[in-house]
Amino acid sequence: MDTTGTEEVWDSAHWATLERRTRERALQARSEPAAWRVIARQARVVMRAYTTSFFIVSRFLPAVKRAEVEMIYAAVRYPDEIVDTFPLAPSERLRQLDEWEKCYEVGLGVESLSEALRVGVPPFLAGFTRVVRERGIPEEHYRSFLAAMRRDVYPRPFATLNELIDDYVYGSAVVVGYFLTHVYGAQTPAHFGRALMSAHDLGIALQLTNFSRDVGEDQKRGRVYLPLDTLRAEGITELDVNDEGQHDALARARQQLAVVAAGYYASAQRRVDAFAPDCRPAIQACIKVYGRLNERIAGTSDMRRRASVPLREKLQGLPPSKFWRIPLAYLLR
């Protein structure tokens, strides 16, 4: 699950050190709000390290909602690292995911951050379960996310696009969009359903864009996210990015997925008005920035280079009146 694009990778020792220091400082805090601020600051460090695009667009959120979004990001980033980055045997990946989910269940049952930390819940998970409780996020959504992470431990291909979306993208990306929607809020309670529909389509779009971009990286991990029927229609029976003879066909398959993603971006855009006004600039910026990345993927046949959007182009998709937030976000730690 990578809906943002990794800029930096930490090893498990770095994560362990961060968790230990965050726990110590949060337990030393004199109040629940102070403990929350400690954990939220470190969640911001995680987001800032791992993603440029999402970090930038999230700067346009109100401070309270931004901190909750950063907490959500940290809570989904760590399981993703267990599956994608840490040098672990598959059985150990599953064990760590199971342990993480047990901590999630414990965190749901306690009423304060300090209590959660004292019973062994990791800081970012303690903060996330607080967001789940306070924002009324259905508890099952995070379980669906972890189920998608488990699927990546023993990856298998997907026969069709519908299977890919239903069996994987829902858990890896759509439910994350649902988390965010509960934080963003709707224009009115009556608009909440439309906001969820926008988040649903945006989650699919983001994930399809990443699948199109990261074909080579995914293959190194033994994963094929391009639907098999799409590959076979282009004459590819067994994907091999290193086979230059497949590059033109692969480029066409990627472009097909990018076209589908573009439709989901457009669908998400049509419903942005359903969200609370103070969150729309961030959501629209996300659609613009990743929409441009999707266009770059659709317009290139170069399988050797990982497509990206230069910072200058990213800024063109952001609200000009709030550019001042960008340098502050990068200067302040």
Image (spheres, helix red, strand yellow):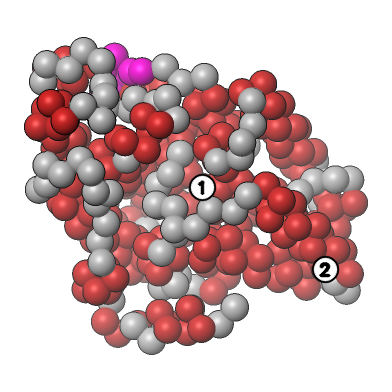
| Image marks 2 and 1: residues in contact by CB distance under 8 Å | no
- In x, y percent, where is residue 261? 22, 41
Which residue does the image show at 89% across and 69% down from the upper left?
28
In the image, which disc is placed on residue 179?
Answer: 1
Is residue 106 in view from this perspective?
Answer: yes
In terms of image quadrants, where is residue 85?
top right
> Left or right of 54: which side holds 23?
right
Magenta-colored span = 157-163
**In the depicted view, which residue is nearer to us: 247 or 320?**
247
**How far is the residue under mark 2 from the one under mark 1?**
27 Å
Which residue does the image show at 71% across and 64% down from the upper left?
39
Q: Amino acid at mark 1?
A: Phe
In terms of image quadrants, where is residue 227?
top left
- In x, y percent, where is residue 178? 46, 44
Query: Which numbered disc, 2 or 1, marks the residue closer to the eye?
Result: 2
Which residue does the image show at 27% across and 43% down from the upper left?
213
In the image, which disc is placed on residue 25?
Answer: 2
- In x, y percent, where is residue 57? 38, 67
Q: Residues within 10 Å of mark 2 (few under 14, many from 20)?
A: few
Q: Is residue 159 magenta?
A: yes
> Left or right of 330: which side holds 310?
left
**In the depicted view, which residue is nearer to us: 49 or 222?**
222
Q: Nearer the N terminus, badge 2 or badge 1?
A: 2
